[in-house]
Amino acid sequence: MSSTTENALFDTDLFDTDVLIVGAGPTGLTLACELARRGVRHRIVERLETPSRTSRGKGLQARSLEVFDDLGIAAEILTTGEVKLPVRLYDVDGGWTDREPLTTPSAIATPYPEMLWIAEFDVERVLRERHAQYGGEVRFGTAVTGLTEVESGVEAGLRGPDGPGVLRARWVVGADGGGSIVRKTLGIPFEGVTRPTSYYLGDVRTLDLDRGRMHMWASETGMLALTPLPGTDLWQFQCAVPTSAGGYEEPSLELYQRIIDDRAGAGRVRFTDVSWLSLYGANVRLAEHYREGRVLIAGDAAHNHTPAGGQGMNMGIQDAYNLGWKLAAVLRGADPALLDTYEPERRPVAEIVLAASTAKSDRVQDNAHNDATHLSTALVGLTDDFTPGLTIAYPRSALTHDGAGRRVPYVTGLRGPGFAGTTADLVRGPHWAALAFADDTDFELGALRHDEIRLHRIGKGAITDPHDALRSAFGVEDNTLVLIRPDGHIALTTPLHPAPVLPEALASFLPNGAHSG
């Protein structure tokens, strides 16, 4: 390998970096932030020349907002987006009906009970800024041209602004979308179907609609929706079109104007400008596996589904949150088998989302040909208990013991010396956490006394749980210890007496050399 060629893109040593992330969308950027805050050397490359200014995904669910809370960007994300967005539904005859927002507040306790409407480009911007605060930088205009596994790492062929080069990384993560070059290079099967409905998408401008609501039209040819993008003067145009044997007309401002004239009536809604146009063929596909040696895939590179239910951007963010801490731990000496838990935990979630989004899409399309009443009924089922992502659990994971695996429940009103907050405050940060439910300190932690585990005692003289809300939420009694993973899922529930025993498999997943005695 020529060092001159390598230096065209990057400085070089035996390994130029520990993790190469391919793709700087929400998935890749979330992973980059996860690695950066843990001090992991990484590079993130993006084939686009400049940051995207297309809306694409436009909603963040509760669990993704909890992830961003942990990353320290939830407040800025919330001020950028919009929580409640009522809907106006139009009949084919021009009549309309107003209804409540498509999404309903989560019935499960969370600091973020409402879905947040926000353009994907704004999510990426906030993540890029956070990444930059850690000293990170996205290499735009840089594409992967090949991957070759070498001893203890991967050689990635790259083509960037200065020409071709090679980068050596210990691990590579493909977060490069549905057409993933990483997945294709690995030859991972991406089985599934192309849906019979495609979508015209775009970001348009108009002064003729109320920006305080989403507008949707039922039509014999399918549904049309215009959604205001918070913090901008743009609307996302989304129009379902049946598959045509004769092909589709190329997206254009003139075409979109004809479509809205047909649905709303000529001259009622006038588009003055467009900043993005796209014809999107809805695919429902799932990668056969998420890992090949030292290369992993995440987000749309691993799974595609219909837009119904608003899960696409969220799935990728949560894939990255699951994967990031595991990569960091392995690079610091944890058993590499820790990475074997990524696919068994995240792929079943994708299977559920693919099935649910397909069913929801069918229901909406079947009713979009009728009137506003039928369409409104179909929209009621777009959100369910699974949609916010708060019920996702990993009960059969190698990281889970004694029936654990669920997300840490959200409990408020906790008090203690120098502390007033919630369970989210107790587990926030790039570390494991342990909650010891005990009224005294007469217990031994044994193997759980570890630099990677932050201990909180719940009981007299410590953090108080006056109404037993915490014990009830966790389903535990006194003299119990709950071990919590860095991604906020419960790994283990065990008695405090005698000293807790950390299962050997679980102990091997902690970074080596961090025991404090």
Image: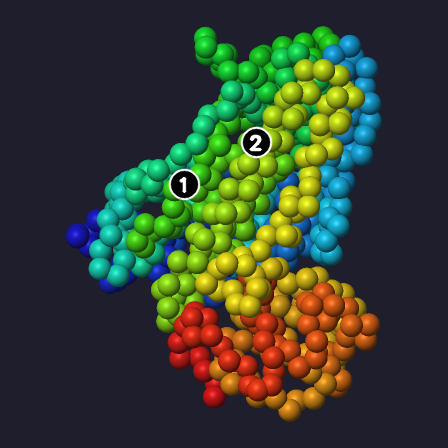
Residue at 24% in and 49% down:
148
Nearest the viewer among 82 and 510 is: 510
Q: In the rendered view, does 323 fall on the left or right side of 421?
A: left
Q: Is residue 288 above or below residue 43?
A: above
Nearest the viewer among 22 and 480 is: 480
Q: How is the image coloured?
A: rainbow
Residue at 66% in and 89% down:
441
Q: In the rendered view, does 407 fall on the left or right side of 245?
A: right
Which is more N-terminal, label 2 or label 1?
Answer: 1
Q: Residue furthest front?
A: 402
Residue kind at label 2, given as amino acid type: Thr
Real-space CA distance between mark 1 and mark 2, rounded to the nearest whole angstrom = 17 Å
Q: In the rendered view, does 234 fall on the left or right side of 200?
A: right
Nearest the viewer among 204 and 92 is: 92
Q: Where does the image place residue 389, in percent across and percent down from the top left?
A: 62, 49
Query: Residue beneath label 2, please?
Result: 358
Q: Where does the image place residue 412, in percent across and percent down from the top left?
A: 76, 65
Q: In the rendered view, does 301 fall on the left or right side of 495?
A: left
Q: Where does the image place residue 215, in percent across and percent down from the top left?
A: 73, 25
Residue at 50% in and 24% down:
195
Question: Can I make out residue 16 in this image?
Answer: no
Query: Residue beneath label 1, please?
Result: 287
Q: Residues within 10 Å of mark 2 (few under 14, many from 20)?
A: some
